[in-house]
Amino acid sequence: MIKCVNCNSDKVVKAGLHKSEKYGIRQVYLCKECGRKFIEHAKSPRYSQEFKEHVVRCVVCEELGIRQASRTSI
Ligand SMILES: [Zn+2]
C-alpha cells in the first residue's frame, strides 16, 4: 500500500512517471488528501551509497576486531 510521504494518507493516485538518468523510470504518485506529489521508494542514492559503504566498513572493522581480539585474548 502506497502512502503519502507528507500526511501518510493512502488516498494516493498514480500521476505519471518520473524519468531520470540516475534513478531510471519510477512511478509518481499524487496525494488527494494534501495534493503533494511524491515518487515511490524515493531514496537519496548519495546517502544510501555512503550508508552502504559505512555499514560495510563497520562490518569489516568489527570482524577484524573480533578476529584480532580472539587471537590476542587466547
Ligand atoms: Zn498527503
Image: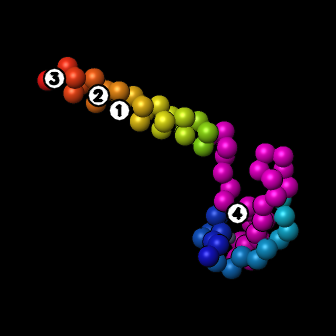
Quadrant of the rendered structure where residue 62 is?
top left
- In the figure, residue 34 lies in which quadrant? bottom right
Instruction: Name the amino acid, label 1.
Output: Glu
Residue, disc 4 = 40
Q: Distance between the residues labelled 2 and 4?
A: 41 Å
Residue 61's place in the image compared with 25, above or below, is above
- Number of labelled discs? 4
- Residue at mark 3 to residue at mark 2: CA–CA distance: 10 Å
Q: What type is the residue that disc 4 sits on?
A: Glu
Please name the residue that numbered disc 2 is placed on: 67
> Which percent across, then down, holds residue 41?
66, 59
Q: Nearer the viewer, mark 4 or mark 3?
A: 3
| Viewer-closest of 42 and 74 | 74
Q: In this view, does 53 lie to the left or right of 11?
A: left
Which residue lies under the disc numbered 3?
73
In x, y percent, where is residue 67?
29, 28
Whichever of labels 4 and 1 marks the residue nearer the N terminus, that label is: 4
Q: Which amino acid does label 3 sit on?
A: Ser
Q: How far apart are marks 1 and 3 (CA)?
A: 15 Å
Near-viewer residue (26 or 8): 26
Residue position for label 1: 63
Amino acid type of the residue that numbered disc 2 sits on in the rendered structure:
Arg
Q: Image height check: is 11 above or below 50?
A: below
For the record, the magenta segment spans 19-47
Structural crowding at the residue carrying mark 3, measured as other residues with C-alpha within 10 Å and reported as few (<14), some (14–19) or many (≥20): few
Q: Distance between the residues labelled 4 and 3?
A: 49 Å
Q: In which quarter of the image is ligand 1?
A: bottom right
Which quadrant is home to the C terminus? top left
